[in-house]
Amino acid sequence: MKRAFGTVERITGVDTPGQLTAYLVALGHGGTHWVMGTVYILVPFVRQDLGLSYAEVGAVYTAMAMAAFAINIGSGVIVDLTGRRVLLLGLGLGFCAMALMVIGLVPSLLGLTLGVMIIGGANNLWHPAAFSFLAGRFPNNRGFALSVHGVGANIGDALGPLAAGGLMVWFGWQGAAIANALPMFGFAVIIVLIMWRGERRDRTEAPPSVNLRTYFQGMIRMVKQRAVLGVCLLAGCRTMTQNGIYVFLPLYLTDVIGIEAVVLGFVMATMQTGGMVSGPIAGTWSDRIGRRPIVLAGLAATVLVVVMLTLIRDEILLVATVGLLGFALFAVRPVVHSWMMDLTPPGMSGGATSLVFGAQSAMRMVIPILGGFVADTWGLIHVFHLVVAIAVLGIITAALVPVQKTAAAAP
């Protein structure tokens, strides 16, 4: 074990205790995505059970994005002005688990909508606290730290659907929702108990004695930077691409290809496995050669693989292609977020995270309902053509983001 950690330490330049902290935060992130991944795998079967149209399913996901946007407005400010990152991390994961319970216990369009809205909001409570914690703890290795955080998401997105797909065979979608929620309550408590003492002993950033006027003046100066706005637009395009795939790929595989729940869970897990491999490589590499080349390569590869996906009908080849899609798509995520942290002044990483996730949530509102309209009108296959167009817009944006000096690292 020591030898393995020593190898990682030499590659990344991060000490072993720091690595362990990053991994713990990443596992908590995996818990939030375990819940999200469960929702994505349940919804095709909820749709069939409740008789929902694709547009109605899209509207449910748009409601999730709206809740995420609303919570996002204040969560970053709360993180920066209170410094209570660990408490907010525990609350974020706990609310995700509670919402999944709601979906299972209230089998209706109302229960589904309420549940996904809580999940969307809780996820945007998690991210500012986590990004602020990691960006402050790893000022010179943000690509590594945020890529590990992203791998946690991939693990949760992989295992959640696998567990849900298997549980649905015996308990149906309601039982699967409830069963997948229960472990996350305990996980939230564990995170708070383990990290609370460490946060008190060694805060990444001490609670600032900054008044609100000074803080918001800093936010306004940051928003006026073209590079910051460009990265926000880029993050929004990447998230729209990812969300379009998350929402409509399970529907396409069940309704058009005709695969069963267990196989669907396996296919979606394969996509996350690709991300587990590419995320740390891309994040660490971007620390050395820069963010832009990695983003351009990842989005270009995503476009090619999504086009391939629309042409394949063989199940084995389909699984391999979805794995390639995850490898390309999830390589971009930690690099874009690291790019934003590079542009963020000290003491404002929570607010910057809210800014970038606010852009993501605002743009993510569009794709589910627009994709649902496209699917109802012309067919599910054409939603992927829309996804390709959005990814191309992301490539153009990444190429045009102006070069700007990296902000000073937080003390």
Image (spheres, rainbow, N blue to C red):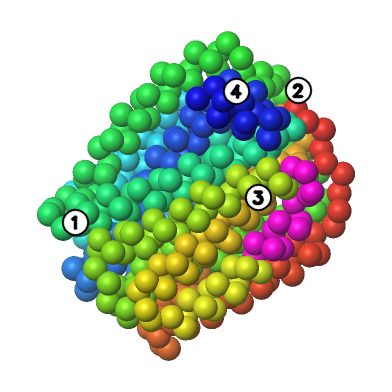
386 relative position to 392: left or right: left
* Distance in Å between CA atoms under marks 1 and 2: 49 Å
| Residue to which mark 1 is pinned | 168
Give, as a three-letter code, the residue at label 3: Ala
Judged from this view, the residue extending furthest toward the front is 3
Q: Are marks 2 and 4 in contact (CB under 8 Å)?
A: no
Q: Residue at x 27, y 72 (%)?
A: 259
In primary-sequence order, the first of circles 2 and 4 is 4
In primary-sequence order, the first of circles 1 and 2 is 1
Name the secondary structure under disc 4: helix
| Residue 10 falls in image quadrant | top right
Q: Is residue 60 visible?
A: no
Q: Nearer the viewer, mark 2 or mark 4?
A: 4
Residue segment shown in magenta? 287-299
Q: Is residue 405 visible?
A: yes
Give, as a three-letter code, the residue at label 2: Pro
* Distance in Å between CA atoms under marks 2 and 4: 20 Å
Give, as a three-letter code, the residue at label 1: Met
Name the secondary structure under disc 2: loop
Q: Nearer the viewer, mark 2 or mark 3?
A: 3
| Residue to which mark 4 is pinned | 16
Q: Quadrant of the C terminus?
A: top right
| Residue to which mark 3 is pinned | 282
